[in-house]
Amino acid sequence: MATTINITKRTDTKINNVDFNNLIFGTVFTDHMFYCDYKDGQWQQPQITPYQAMSFDPAARVFHYGQAVFEGMKAYKDEEGKIFLFRPDQNFKRINKSSARLAMPEFPEDFFFEGLTELLKLDSAWIKPGVGNSLYLRPFVIATEPAISASPAKEYRFMIILSPAKAYYAGKVRVLFAEKFSRAANGGVGFAKAAGNYAAQFYPTSLAQKKGYQQVIWTDANSHENLEEAGTMNVFFRINDTLITAPTSDRILDGVTRKSLIQLCDDLNINCEVRNITVSEIKTAAKNGSLKEIFGAGTAAVISPVEAFEHAEELFELPEIENSYGSLLKDSMLKIQHNLAEDKHGWRYEVR
Ligand SMILES: *Cc1c(COP(=O)(O)O)cnc(C)c1O
């Protein structure tokens, strides 16, 4: 089934007012947006319109019961002007997995890819070539039905908005290992990109920030002994020459960056183990000098190196390291994403 998106274009563009060298992540949006409503048991005619505010009934269920899921992806442009996405099939599958967990309807694959394609073609001037430049894509779904009884909505809106992102030279982060708060529980929604997972992290993260840590590394809710993920990123630990990352579960989000890095380790002959990692293992390794690196992995920054962590009032500083696996892996990922390296695994998706 070929969709025909109903397209209303802007007659002008906002792009000339944007300073692409000083972008603050997630604050500037392109000229157009995509949306599609679900009602009467089906997805309706998809729309592309000028980017604009929308109005919703105050009783829309998303405001009361938090039925909201999202995705985060990036589009890249090479020097010839070709536009690429990175493994968008993974984001498509994941948003529907997230939706299913929140009792929300799945979005059709053809609508998803046509929506992305048409929107990116219309706003392609917003994707700047050059490694590090990208356009961040935010697909999301919210429950719009105006009814505040506590049950799943019968009406939804799927949307895609686009935000240009500058080369993200993330500084190193200091992190706190969680001892009291939890992000996710067994049987819960930790594996889903549910908006509420983020809301629930803001308060414990703000306490960590007051102590001088930018992020929390979440531990399992039962024992607080297994290191799980950073809440917007999956985490990798390097002990001697081995990288370790936790297995995904219903508490851990199955990151596209994480799974791509595991494959790249194989390609680059870096030993990578997927297994449980305990706080005590990492503290012991930090004390005896075998802990070489910790980094977060996610679409926004690809890799965020960690310079220090705290647990139970003990602070550990990581050593400066040459030829870090983090920077090697980041470099390889960026080259594949920007069409500067061979794409052995068919991860690039050309938008045309
Ligand atoms: C989005 C997200 C990640 C990273 O996933 P990517 O697909 O690599 O961007 C990790 N953890 C959580 C909780 C997330 O929401």
Image: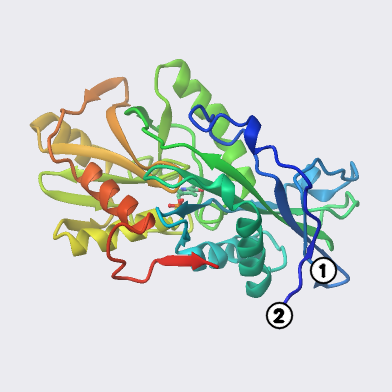
Q: Local crowd at mark 2 within 10 Å, few (<14), some, or many (≥20)?
A: few
Residue, far bottom: 1
Quadrant of the image containing the N terminus: bottom right
**Residue at mark 2: C-beta within 8 A of ligand 1:** no
In the foreground, 94 or 239:
94
State the SS at label 1. Answer: loop
Quadrant of the image containing the C terminus: bottom right
Residue at position x 27%, y 47% from top? 331
Placement of 20 over or under 59, stated as above or below:
above
Q: Local crowd at mark 1 within 10 Å, few (<14), some, or many (≥20)?
A: some
Residue at position x 64%, y 66% from top? 112
Percent x, y of residue 333:
32, 53
Left or right position of 250 against 114: left
Residue at position x 32%, y 25% from top? 312
Tag 2 and tag 1, C-beta contact below 8 Å = no
Left or right position of 276 against 155: left
Residue of label 2: 2
Placement of 243 over or under 317, stated as above or below:
below
Placement of 307 over or under 119, stated as above or below:
above
Coloured how? Answer: rainbow
Percent x, y of residue 113:
61, 68
Residue of label 1: 45
Q: Amino acid at mark 2?
A: Ala
Residue at position x 31%, y 20% from top? 313
Whichever of callouts 2 and 1 sits on the residue coming sooner in the sequence is 2
Separation of residues labelled 2 and 1 (CA atoms): 12 Å
In the foreground, 235 or 87:
87
Percent x, y of residue 162:
62, 47
Q: Amino acid at mark 1?
A: Gln
Left or right position of 52 against 256: right
Q: Quadrant of residue 126?
A: top right
